[in-house]
Each structure stands twice: as structure tokens, then as C-alpha cells.
Image (cartoon, helix red, strand yellow):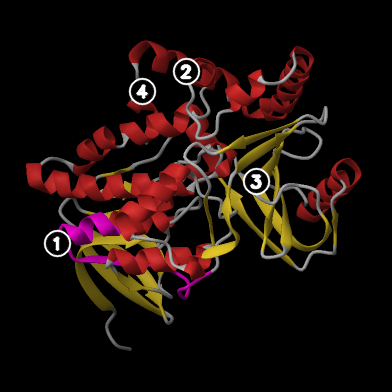
Amino acid sequence: MSDPQEIRTDVLIVGASLAASAAAKRLVDAGFDVVALERRTLPRDKVCSGILSPRGHRFLVENFGPLPPEALHEPASCRGVTFHFPSMISIPMDFNGGPTPHLHRKFSDYWAIKQSGVTVHDNTTFLDLRDDGKEVTVRARKDCRDVFYRARFVIGADGPKSGVTKSLYPDYRTGIAWFMVGQKFQRIIECPLDRDYFHFWFHPGLGHYTWSHERNDQQIVGVGFPAGGNLHRAHANVERYLEEKHGVRLEPAEKLEGCAQNFGPSLINRYVFGKGNVLITGQAAGFFNMLAEGMSCALHSGAISGEAVIEALKRNLPVQEVYRTLIASEVRRCTDQWNPLQILLGNPHEADFKASFRRLSRRDRIRVVRDLLDFLRIYAPYKWGRQMLGQAMVRLLKGDYPSERWL
């Protein structure tokens, strides 16, 4: 048997999604030799609504250039989001800054990673790592053979169930709540829902996260619930509700896709950023915007991880010290979206819910508040409420979220 292959690089990025692309772009532009590992063959499918926020859109255009046509679904853009409530009140809200792209993640991610200039090793699975303080050794698997990478720094941008995070913190996955998110694609018979909007239901009888929007002449019907539930049963319940209450009639599902999600860390400021010369970024770190739009914070946090490496070397400082200082701005932006005091006193979102809410009659405002309170009760078992309020108070008094809660 031949000896295992060994590859040296300045920075190794695990993952080839948007967070990885942003980190790679910063590092390659600064002159570093960078390799990204991807366990699947590129371009690969990605479970995602594809509805990008205005902030994420600006980042893509400013850093990678105009989006190519193949990177978009039809409809190619989204005007905003519509909230629906059990009382049958619907609140449409346009995104601040105008419509945003509806990304085809298979090709938009592939375009971004190519635009970054990084060297990509796909069909290569991350296995584990060892950090001796001077160099990080990563063991990966390609074509049934071990490959060893030696790098000054490693960036974990490998999504919710991050292998890099597991290598650093073996018990981390068991310490957070997990949700199953699944979406089915169905041909449209009749759908009165406005195709220019992403639709979300605050309905405790439908699930913890329920949404729908049009894509390529099909309607996506999605539902999220605690891990261990039955996707087909949850989906059938939502499909029945949409037909009875909104007149949505769809053909049987042609396609199903689903994945596990880590909703909780961004709500309660329990991010994981790594240790030593290993940085964690994107959704692997816990970033997740309200309405489950994770792309914009993945892009920005990924870029910050790359900037932290550059700054640490320039100033001869520990990279974790630099990274945790720089990433605080993205923590504020992301966790503010879930912060009840920020929502009441400010406007942390890219669609103005408060302005739309104020346009309702007094009676309808009361009904919406009652619906929201009923919906929030399904999250009670996770005991996030007190933590969110505690973090909100610290943010109000000190202007920031405490980094002591981060791994």
C-alpha cells in the first residue's frame, strides 16, 4: 500500500458553500495559498429556500460581481415576506432596498467558490484534525484513501453538523436543540399566494417553522419541527391547511429534500468560534437569521474569519483573539434579530414589521399579538425565553453581547 498523500497550504477551509467562498476570497486576495475541501462533487445540490436578504445580495455583488443567469431560480427575485396568522390576518412586507435574488444554490455556490480563486478539492471528506499550536493537521478521505493536509490555519465552514466543530468539541451536538426542516416540491393547480413573496405561518398547529413560495412552476411547501418527528405527516398537515384556508391546490409532491438545523445558538448568544488555530464560521458557528435566511450571515461571518487570519499574522496576535473581536459585529447583527427589546425599540430586520403592524386596525393588532404569543409557547420546552431576555438586557445596558458564552 502506498503512503498517504500529504498536502501543505497556508489555510485549509472545510466546506465549499457561501461562508467558505467569502473566507477564501479575502485570503486569496491577500496572497495566501488556500485549499477548500468539499465532500461532494461540485456543483452539488443544497437544501435552501434560496431567498437572499438585501444585505447578502449587496455582499455578493460587491465581492463576486453580478450574478449569472444560471445562479437564479424563477421567479428570479423576491419582493419580501408575508406573515400569516391563525386569525387569517396576513401582513406583506417588502424588503428594505427592493427585491432580492432567488438563488439556485447548486449553481450560485459553485459560481461563488470559483470566483473566490480558491483551490477546491471536492469528493474529499473531512475526518478529524490535530492542532499542535504551530500547525494544524487535517485527515481527510478521498477515493477510499486518507489524505493529510497541513495548514497554518483551518476554517470550519461546513454547516450545521460541522465535522470541524465535532473534532474540537465532541459533546457540542448533544448540548443544543436540533430541528428537522423538510420541503416538498409540487406542481401548482391553483395558488392564490403572491408568487413575489416568501410566505411564513405563525401557527402552532402547523409546526415550529412553516413556509411556502414558488420555484420554477412548482410550489415549495416546507415545515420545520423538533428532530425525531415525521416529515410526511407534518407536511400533509400543512398541505391540508393551505388548501382549506388559502385555496392552495397542488399536485402530489415530485421531490422531497430535508436537513437538520441548529436554530438555537443565535437566539441565545451561544455561538461556537473554535479554538487555537481553528476557526468556525457560518452556520457551523450558529449564525442563523430570523426566517431562517442564513446566507447573508454566512457570507459576512466567513469574510470576517478570513480577515481575522490576515490581521492576526499582520499584527502577530493569536487568531482567536482577533477573530472574536471582529466577529462581535456579526453577533450583534444576527442576535439582534431575535432580541425582543431590539425588535420593540429598533428595527433589526430588513423588512419593517412594525410599520406594517401599525397599519392594522386596533382589533387586528390585538389578534396578531395573541397569535404570536400562542405560537411562541411551542418553544417553551427549550427554555430559551429567559436566556433571550437576559441577553437582551445585557445588550441594552452594555451595547454588546457577552463573549463569555461563546465556545
- Indicate which disc residue 31 carries: 1
Q: Residues within 10 Å of mark 2 (few under 14, many from 20)?
A: many
Three-letter amino acid code of the residue under disc 2: Ala
Three-letter amino acid code of the residue under disc 1: Gly
Which quadrant of the structure image shows residue 354?
Answer: top right
**Quick check: marks 3 and 4 in contact, CB under 8 Å?**
no
Marks 4/2: CA–CA distance: 11 Å
- Write down the region rendered in magenta: 24-44
Q: Residues within 10 Å of mark 1 (few under 14, many from 20)?
A: few
Three-letter amino acid code of the residue under disc 3: Tyr
On the image, numbered disc 2 is attached to which residue? 392
Residue 36 magenta-drawn?
yes
Q: Which quarter of the rendering shows the C terminus?
A: top left
Q: Secondary structure at mark 4?
A: loop
On the image, numbered disc 4 is attached to which residue? 402
Which quadrant of the structure image shows residue 318?
Answer: top left
Marks 3/2: CA–CA distance: 30 Å
Can residue 93 be seen at all in this image of the molecule? yes
Three-letter amino acid code of the residue under disc 4: Pro
- Indicate which disc residue 197 carries: 3
Can residue 157 be seen at all in this image of the molecule? no
Q: Which quarter of the rendering shows the N terminus?
A: bottom left
Q: Nearer the viewer, residue 375 or 70?
A: 70
Marks 2/1: CA–CA distance: 40 Å
